[in-house]
Structure formats: structure tokens, C-alpha cells
Amino acid sequence: RTGERIAQRADDVYDAELLGTIRADSEAFLDTLDRGLEDAAGAPAAERPVAADELPISDYEQLTDDQIAARLPGLSPAQLSQVEAFERANAGRAAVLDQIAALSHPWPDYDDMNVNEIRARLRKDADPALAIRVMDYERRHQARSTVITAAMRLSTV
């Protein structure tokens, strides 16, 4: 707006129009973004219903428990969450939900932590069962050798 006003005062019609167009486009974009964020904030992903066609496993509803369980290990944590939300809202099959739980991250903020933070948490908790979950999860997802080694040491404590 300031640039637009300066251009208008300088009788620079071309730049005033250009800056006005840029401002209008930016404001429209911000309004769209704001509405999208309000919608997302109003319905957290875990509570939003997930449609079968949004799932990362095609023909999900036609598959057996074993067929679904066989495809789960290749999914990302976000995709596992989608499948879990769908399964809980629909069939609620224990075999599928148990497999998802087994593949899920060791603790809620695990994926946001770096190697040093994970190793510190493992040392602090010193829980062999947790160390085994970390080791299994790391092998399936990020395969960071330093985390796997630290978890291996603690899993035999």
C-alpha cells in the first residue's frame, strides 16, 4: 500500500497500477489462506472423517485384515494415521489397529526430534522395551545407525 501511494503521489500510473494489482492479489491469497487455516483449526486431522478413496491403500474396503496388515509397513506415519482414523470410524478391526500400533512411532513427538534428542530420551528413560520399539521403528523408517546403536545398547540392559 505504501509503495502504491508513493507511486500515485509521483504520478507514476504504471507502477501504481502494478503495485495495486500485486496488493489485491496478495490480499486475496491471504484471505484464502486464512479461511483454509480456520477450516483446518476447526477440524483437527484426527477428527476429520477420512474417505476410503483418500487412503494410501487402494481398494481398502475390499481387502482382508491380513492383506491390509501386509501393506501397512510401507506407509509413512501420516499415512498410518489416515488408515487408523478410517479403521476406527468404520470397521474397527483389532488386527489392523494392532498392526498400526506396532508400526507407530515410539512416542508422540519422536519424528520432530533429532538424533541427539532421541538418544538423550533413551538414556533418560532407560527402558529396554522402549529401546526395542525405537530400534524397530528406526529400522523401518529412517534407519539412522546412531539411534539404532543407542537403542540396541539399552535394549539389552
Image: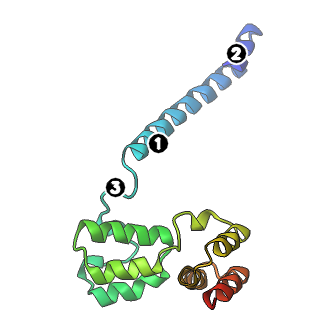
Query: For mark 3, what is the residue?
Result: 47
Q: Earlier in the sequence, mark 2 or mark 1?
A: 2
- Element carrying mark 1: helix
- Spatial CA span between label 3 and label 1: 15 Å
State the image quarter where residue 23 is shown. top right
Q: Position of residue 138 (x, y in %)?
A: 60, 81
Q: Is residue 132 left or right of residue 46?
A: right
At 33% from the left edge and 77% from the top edge, which residue is drawn? 97
The three-letter code of the residue at mark 1 reads: Leu
**For the residues bearing labels 3 and 1, Cβ distance under 8 angstroms:** no
Query: For mark 2, what is the residue?
Result: 13
Q: Nearer the viewer, mark 3 or mark 1?
A: 3
Q: Nearer the viewer, mark 3 or mark 2?
A: 3
Callout 3: few (<14), some (14-19), or many (20+) C-alpha neighbours within 10 Å? Answer: few
Q: Position of residue 108 (x, y in %)?
A: 51, 65
Q: Position of residue 61 (x, y in %)?
A: 25, 77
Callout 2: few (<14), some (14-19), or many (20+) C-alpha neighbours within 10 Å? Answer: few
Which is more toward the observer, 149 or 12?
A: 149
The three-letter code of the residue at mark 2 reads: Val
Query: For mark 1, what is the residue?
Result: 37
Q: Is residue 23 left or right of residue 7?
A: left
Give above or below for 11 relative to 59.
Answer: above
